[in-house]
Image (cartoon, rainbow, N blue to C red):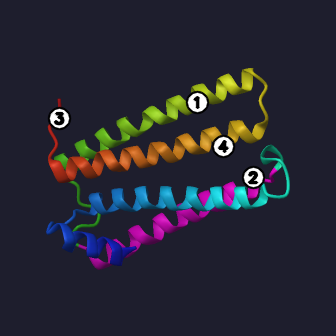
Amino acid sequence: MSALLYILSKMTGMEMSFEEKTAWIMGVLAIGSYGGYVVIVLSLAGTMPVAEVPYVAPMLWTVGASIAASIALQALIGIFTPREAGRKDQRDKEIYRFGEYIGQSFVVIGGVAALLMAMAELDYFWIANVIYLTFVLSAILGSVAKIVAYRRGFQPW
């Protein structure tokens, strides 16, 4: 992953701050872990109805692996760029907050969707999966917003 960030920074001709690298890590891991989860669930669904697939363990493993990978990759970046690690200026703080606000919209959408699905008494499989999907979309959207703010500029309103 750090090799990917290095290649990306060389291709774009721009150095990345620690916070921008973290945004890339979160976005890529969200896509990768959810992709892995979908592959596992769909491979199990070949033998049974999708709603009966044992989804809890794959979901917990992919979420846990994503968290562990994020911690490890951020530690590696901190080791390779110790001067940048933990340093945030005002712009970094505002971009972080902006990205989080943007991403949280999907958490709200997921909460409302899960509430409506529970009221309709849908299967736990669908409720859990819509919540997981909206968490992933939240991480991706928040990461994209942060990366765009770093690359294109950021004007707080």
Q: Residues within 10 Å of mark 4 (few under 14, many from 20)?
A: some
Residue 129 is labelled as: 4
- Is 55 one of the magenta-colored residues? yes
- The numbered mark, 4 or 3, whose residue comes first in the sequence reads 4
Q: Is mark 4 on a helix, strand or loop?
A: helix
What amino acid is at disc 3?
Answer: Pro
Name the residue located 16 percent from the left edge and 49 percent from the top edge.
Answer: 152
Instruction: State the image coordinates of residue 22 (x, y, percent, origin top left).
Output: 35, 60
- Establish if 122 lies above or below 99: above
Residue 89: tell me if it is visible. Answer: no
Q: What element carries label 3?
A: loop
The spot of residue 155 in percent (x, y) is: 14, 37
- 84 to the left or right of 67: left
Kindly check if marks 2 and 4 are in contact, taking CB atoms under 8 A apart as contact.
no
Q: How far apart are marks 2 and 3 (CA)?
A: 41 Å
Residue 70 falls inside the magenta stretch: yes
Considering the image in quadrants, where does the N terminus appear? bottom left
Give above or below for 123 relative to 77: above
Report which residue position mark 1 lands on: 111
Q: Give the range drawn in magenta.
A: 53-82
Determine the residue positioned at 39% across, 44% down.
141
Q: Distance between the residues labelled 3 and 1?
A: 28 Å
Mark 2 vs 4, N-terminal side: 2
Estimate how packed mark 2 is, as few (under 14), some (14 to 19) or many (20 or more) residues with alpha carbons within 10 Å: few
Type of amino acid under label 2 = Val
